[in-house]
């Protein structure tokens, strides 16, 4: 359990380090002095990270899977780069909502109503994502949960059957055997 926790912590640290380092590099080298291009810079960074992650995961797929160590490496690096891509696009969405909330929205001056604008975006996002969640994600989650519970029941049944066999064998050994009937020819 501790090793899984340490692995997850290491992956998160790698993802955040790559994300922050990349943003600093982009801001210092490519968009220095162009703070008005914040959203564009984040989109360019997210696209770059996505392309790099796809290339790295593609290269990792050529590592022979026969060795147990390479399976763990591919899994950890794939998870880490997936997190970097997810966080990069999350920051693009965050910047886009922030910019839209500060601008004029539907004829309402949003500077005074930034909170209402953000709430409106949250409701719209929920309305867009809820059908996908209900129709796709929940059925898959229920299916996986049922498969896991069935496999647990099968394991429990196998353990119970082996326990019964063991107890029967032990009981048979402990039970005194009746003496063999001898026929005296009578």
Image (cartoon, helix red, strand yellow):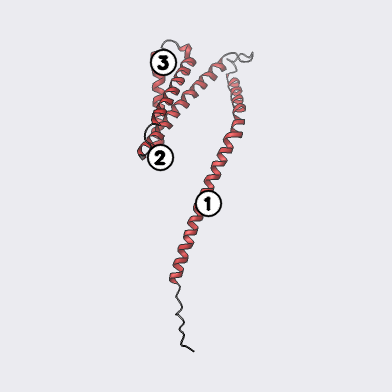
Q: Earlier in the sequence, mark 3 or mark 2?
A: 2
Give residue 130's quadrant in the image: top right
Q: Which mark is residue 153?
A: 1
Q: What residue do we see at 47% from left, 12% from top?
A: 37
Determine whether 162 is above or below 108 in the image: below
Query: Residue 4: which numbered mark, if any?
Result: 2
Q: Are marks 2 and 1 in contact (CB under 8 Å)?
A: no
For image coordinates 54% across by 43% down, the residue present is 145
Q: Residue 155: percent from the left, percent from the top? A: 49, 52
Q: Quadrant of the N terminus?
A: top left
- In the figure, 180 relative to 86: above or below? below
Q: Which residue is mark 3?
A: 27
In the foreground, 69 or 40: 69
Gap between marks 3 and 1 measured at Cα: 55 Å
Image spot of residue 149 (x, y percent): 53, 47
Q: Earlier in the sequence, mark 3 or mark 1?
A: 3
What's the mark number on residue 180? none
């Amino acid at each position: 359990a501790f090793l899984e926790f340490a692995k997850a912590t290491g992956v998160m640290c790698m993802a955040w380090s790559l994300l922050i380092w990349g943003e600093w590099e982009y801001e210092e080298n490519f968009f220095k002095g162009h703070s008005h291009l914040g959203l564009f810079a984040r989109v360019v960074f997210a696209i770059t990270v996505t392309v790099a992650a796809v290339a790295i995961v593609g290269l990792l797929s050529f590592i022979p899977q026969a060795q147990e160590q390479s399976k763990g490496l591919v899994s950890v690096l794939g998870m880490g780069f997936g997190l970097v891509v997810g966080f990069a696009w999350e920051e693009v969405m965050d910047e886009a909502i922030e910019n839209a909330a500060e601008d004029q929205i539907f004829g309402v001056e949003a500077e005074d109503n930034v909170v209402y604008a953000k709430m409106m975006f949250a409701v719209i996002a929920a309305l867009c994502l809820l059908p996908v969640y209900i129709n796709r994600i929940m059925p898959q989650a229920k299916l996986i949960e049922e498969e896991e519970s069935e496999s647990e029941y099968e394991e429990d049944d196998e353990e119970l059957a082996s326990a019964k066999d063991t107890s029967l064998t032990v009981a048979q050994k402990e039970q005194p055997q009746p003496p063999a009937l001898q026929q005296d020819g009578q």
